[in-house]
Image (cartoon, helix red, strand yellow):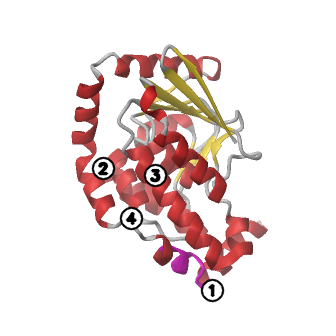
Amino acid sequence: MIDISEQDGVATVRISHGKVNALDLELARGLRDAFESFSSYRAVVLTGNGRAFSAGADLRRLLDEGEPYAVEFLTALEELYTTAFACPMPVVAAIEGHAIAGGCVLAATADVRLMSGGTIGLPELVVGVPFPTVTVEIMRHVLGHRLASVVYGAKAYAPDDALRAGLIDEVVAAEVLLASARERAEALAASPPSTFTRVKGSLRAPAAERIGAARGEGALMARLWTLPEVSAALSRVLAR
């Protein structure tokens, strides 16, 4: 589900969970635990399985298992995003395939995002599910004043368009994606760890404060995600 390798203190974390790395309860918890264990590394490169970085939440499972599962899943997802966003060392996302919805948010927790293929975006409004506060604040940190246009547009951006929209930092050829991500991670890790951690914390402090104030939304979001009108919208999306 999650493979971690290390070279010279830089960890490469590869998500390998089904065909498109859909986020479910087990993957969310596994990634949260992985981020909590990264203190021994100088930097982290986060990537997918070649086909997808992550195509977002496993909507079929949400529909099939109902509100009790949704509470657990959305609580775990909040914990994952909060932990990843607060990771004190450099994190570079190497996006070699689709990073959609929750996968886009996971990539946005990184300090730098490199992309070689696939699409990235926030289709939640079209899909029919509301945004948890942690998602909004992480994306606001990345996009600033462009957040509303990306959310309301609900588009999937190819790499060049994603760069113009501010969703990624660089478009990189697939054959050098991981090497480039590692180079960026090494460059960020060249600063004293305490210096990098302090600077990163300062940059993220406004978003982190708003995320902290909204902690514990899992049960509320589960009720919203399982409303009849939302379930009907999800069913229509899955039937396409």
Q: Residues within 10 Å of mark 2 (few under 14, many from 20)?
A: few
Is the residue under label 4 in contact with that under label 2 (CB below 8 Å)?
Answer: no
Residue range in magenta is 221-227
To which residue does mark 3 refer? 81
Residue 35 percent coordinates (x, y): 49, 41
Q: Which residue type does callout 3 highlight?
A: Tyr
Q: CA distance from mark 2 to mark 4?
A: 15 Å
Q: Residue furthest bottom?
A: 228
The disc placed on residue 133 is 4
* Depth order, front residue of 203/30: 30
Q: Would residue 188 be found to the left or right of residue 5 on screen?
A: left
Query: Is residue 24 in sight in this rendering?
Result: no
The disc placed on residue 144 is 2
Q: Would residue 184 be found to the left or right of residue 158 on screen?
A: left
In the depicted structure, whether residue 196 falls above or below residue 72: above
> SS at mark 2?
helix
* Depth order, front residue of 55/126: 55
> SS at mark 3?
helix
Q: Which residue type does callout 4 highlight?
A: Thr
Q: Residues within 10 Å of mark 4 (few under 14, many from 20)?
A: some
Sooner in the amino-acid sequence: mark 2 or mark 1: 2
To which residue does mark 1 refer? 228
Q: Residue at x 28, y 65 (%)?
A: 213
Q: CA distance from mark 3 to mark 2?
A: 18 Å
- Disc number lying in front (1 or 4): 4
Quadrant (top left, top right, bottom left, bottom right) of the C terminus: bottom right
